[in-house]
Image (cartoon, rainbow, N blue to C red):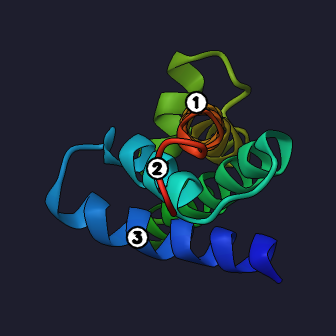
Amino acid sequence: MKFAATILLTITLSFVFGLYFPWWSIALVSFLVAMLIYQKPVIAWLAGFAGIFLCWALLAWWIDAQNDSILSRRIAQLLNLGGGSSVLILLTGLIGAIIGGLAALSGSLLRRYLAPRWPL
């Protein structure tokens, strides 16, 4: 239950922050969510990874569907990904997920470190 709530909160906040702040705000969101909702570091990493992956992959897919995959096919050709937009969408989600997972891991470890000193 806490795992699913963490993923949903990460997705929602990263989407909202992405509208108003730079792309790297996803790291701040994952970090803060992992600090506020304590989970074991591995679970926090997985929640941050999954939340940002779903957010970025779904956003990339939605944007790609809006323009009939014109831009993504050209970018995939430039990057030698075989011209398919699905690989580019997966790669986009994976890059964001690594950032989100590492930020969530950092937040969880900082929470664990500060737990005896900081009442949350």
Q: Quadrant of residue 79?
A: top right
Determine the CA span between mark 2 and mark 1. 47 Å
Q: Nearer the viewer, residue 102 or 109?
A: 109
Residue 72 placement (x, y as % from top left) = 50, 44
Mark 2 vs mark 1, foreground winner is: 2
Q: Earlier in the sequence, mark 2 or mark 1?
A: 1
The quadrant in which the N terminus is found is: bottom right
Determine the CA span between mark 3 and mark 1. 29 Å
Q: Quadrant of residue 55?
A: bottom right
Q: Residue at x 53, y 38 (%)?
A: 114
Q: Is residue 19 visible?
A: yes
Left or right of 2 in this view: 14: left
Which amino acid lies under the numbered mark 3 shown in the image of this protein?
Answer: Leu
Give the crowd class for mark 2: few <14, some 14-19, many >=20 residues within 10 Å: few
Which amino acid lies under the numbered mark 1 shown in the image of this protein?
Answer: Ala
Residue bearing the label numbered 2:
118
- Identify the disc placed on residue 76: 1
Q: Earlier in the sequence, mark 3 or mark 1?
A: 3
Residue bearing the label numbered 3:
13
Q: Is residue 67 visible?
A: no
Q: Earlier in the sequence, mark 3 or mark 2?
A: 3
Residues at circles 3 and 2 in contact by the CB criterion of under 8 Å = no
Left or right of 106 in this view: 50: right
Residues at circles 3 and 1 in contact by the CB criterion of under 8 Å = no
Q: Residue at x 54, y 66 (%)?
A: 10
